[in-house]
Amino acid sequence: MFRSLKTLWKKWRASRNAGHQLDALLALADADAPYAERSEWLIELAHWIHRRGHLDSAEGGTSRAAAAGAPPHRAPPEHARVRYLLHVLERNPAWKDNVGAMLRKLLRESDGISLLCDAGMPVHSGLLGALVGRLQALMIPPAPNRRDLAALVTLMFPATHDPEWIATLPPDLLARLRALIAGADAAASPGQGLGPHPGEFSLDLLTALHNLTCQISSTGLSPTVRSRLSSDDAHVAVERLPFYRLTRAMLAVENARDTGDAARLLPEVTWLRLLLDDCRKATDDVFAHLYRNGVRVDTVFQVERMRMRIVRAERLLDAWMAAGDAPMQARLVADLVEANQQSQSIAHLLRSNFALLSRKVVELSADTGEHYIARDRAEYLTMLRMAAGGGLVTAVTVYVKFGITGAHLPSMIEGVFAGINYALSFLVMHFCHLSLATKQPAMTAPTLARELDGATEAPGRARFASTVVALMRTQAAAVAGNVLLVFPACLAVQLLCGWVFHANLISPFKAHATLQSFSLAGPTPFYAALTGVLLWLSSLVAGWADNWFVLHRVEDALAWNRRLRMTLGVAGAARLAHFCRTNAAGVWGNIVLGMMLGVVPALVSAITFHFEVRHVTLSAGSIGVALGVLGADTLRSGELWWAVAGVASMAVLNVAVSFALALQMALRSRDLRRKDVQPLMRVVWRRIVRRPIDLVWPMRKGQTATEAESSH
């Protein structure tokens, strides 16, 4: 017997005819076989349904599809195969009874709670642990002998389009599938409308719902969540929290169901829905508290998982109450399949973690980013003055840099000293309220993210376009202010030194080498783009520092420190705490940026390829020094103008790369996809085309972007 089954199995696999494959597979169905063999049979049936191409072509004609009553409109090929499968079973009652018995037995013997409760729910709070777990699952798929419905679904529906075709199954196919699974009991239970019939799937739904409500209540009443539902001014009693009353509401629903009291069931279910909605609102309050007072990864993980469980509980409750609604049941199954796929997808894990990281970085620094955007003429002129001051400071930085490189130190030591030089220069700019060009786009991701909150409507898109245009305009002002001051300042210092001391601050050979290194024809654009990445990374560090400072309430610790209050007084300690809170992000961001600009090129050059920093302000100052050394004859050489073109490319690439990365982080923090971004980009482009003057000169104060749009 076993040998004959094995031979038939080989013949089925060797057959290329879809109809013959199905006939052979249905003939192998055995409701009395061991669990593993029945699971493997169902997996093979699912693979037959997944087979690409139309069933007509597989059959070499249209007779069977026509006989099966295939709809004339275009539908997923899986629908045609399911329809053909049901048609074959209806023509063979013995096969139909056997397959129905197999399905009922599999569902009865499998653990459905794993699919209903746990599918799609994250297990690890850390990225590394989750990544290792998913890699293991990818390399070692579950075995068919596991009595786990989630494992069976994983093996049956591996394709990403499976949820779509399952959710769109026609009502007639859903009714026939339900009759197949229910068997002889199909006529007993379409449902009363007030609640589901007492079937096994209904009991699984209720059990899963009970499990979810207990988990939601446990997480919501934990100190991590409960402490963030109260403020410093008011304390919320535990018995008033929806998480505390949720399990009681669930028990009331179960008691009403057990007693069969339909009149009592509806009010209890309504009360449970209201509590779930209150729990969802409470999670929003927790997130608002986190983003206002600092983000901790494990806390966000717990609250995000609790929110997912609330959504799942609502879906299960809807499916439990609408037992006769087959399309709703199909959508539930499709959601579970999709959630199960996402829980095993490495790409989904990376996307979700990057979105969380983005939101963590951008939420606390919106005010910092706002300082880098000039929205009216007064702010625009202020930015020009700040940039001009930054150019003067950078002139000193350029000469110190030439002094460090002229010492011919080992590359790593030279990189450390160069980083200290840059960091000190950036800190001087920060505390003197000056500006450095190209650093601004990386710091404006928080502001862009805040503008994206209303970007689904026309006024929100107009505000976003206005912010982007203002950012471009401000950046142009910053670049102009830096370059127009650093270049003549560096040139003037060299000319003055040559006139007074009859000496050059750098050698003519070094001046020629500097101009040649900035040439547009060389690797300058590539280096400028990498420098833009470093500028963006510094904004991540600034956001992390701001989050750390707020999360650990360092400002309160300093303001209430006993020694500081005794030494500086109460007001002095408060001023010191506020000063540290205001400047924590800026100080750390500038220090890290300076050290990266100095050390990273040395590290990259030692490990992989040669890399040099190409920053527009520093390079413009270096050209000024080289021009002062080489004299006016250099103006007639192509070497100078190729270097000028290279500096122009630095201005574009420094800004474009850091802005693109900042925008991508802002989009990820709001979980926006390409289809959501395209309307925003069209609005920005229309704004630029209609008012190109806005890129170089702002509108009058009080004239909004919406007014500008409506005036054209």
Image (cartoon, rainbow, N blue to C red):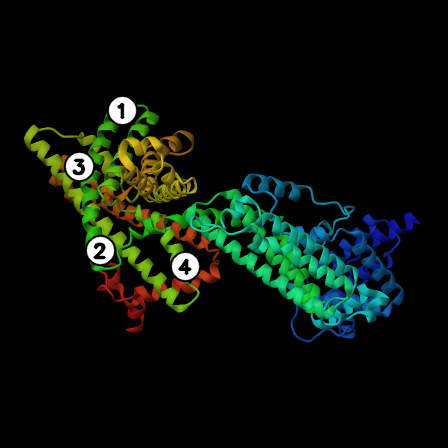
Earlier sequence position, callout 1 versus callout 4: 1
Earlier sequence position, callout 2 versus callout 4: 2
Q: What residue appears at the point 84 percent right and 54 percent down from the top-left corner?
A: 11
Q: Are marks 2 and 4 in contact (CB under 8 Å)?
A: no
Kindly report which numbered mark, 3 or 4, lies closer to the viewer in this rendering.
Answer: 4
**Of residues 118 and 416, the one drawn nearer to the viewer in this rendering:** 118
Q: Position of residue 61 (x, y in %)?
A: 75, 70
User: What is the three-letter code of the residue carrying label 1?
Assistant: His
Residue bearing mark 4: 452
Q: Position of residue 558 (x, y in %)?
A: 35, 36
User: What is the three-letter code of the residue carrying label 4?
Assistant: Leu
Real-space Cα distance between discs 2 and 4?
23 Å
User: What is the three-letter code of the residue carrying label 3?
Assistant: Val
User: What is the three-letter code of the residue carrying label 2?
Assistant: Tyr
Mark 4 element type: helix
Classed neighbour count for the residue bearing mark 2: other residues with Cα under 10 Å, few (<14), some (14–19), many (≥20): many
Earlier sequence position, callout 3 versus callout 4: 4
Residue bearing mark 2: 380
Residue bearing mark 1: 408
Classed neighbour count for the residue bearing mark 3: other residues with Cα under 10 Å, few (<14), some (14–19), many (≥20): many
Residue bearing mark 3: 625
Earlier sequence position, callout 2 versus callout 1: 2
Real-space Cα distance between discs 3 and 4?
44 Å
Real-space Cα distance between discs 1 and 4?
49 Å
Q: Are marks 2 and 1 in contact (CB under 8 Å)?
A: no
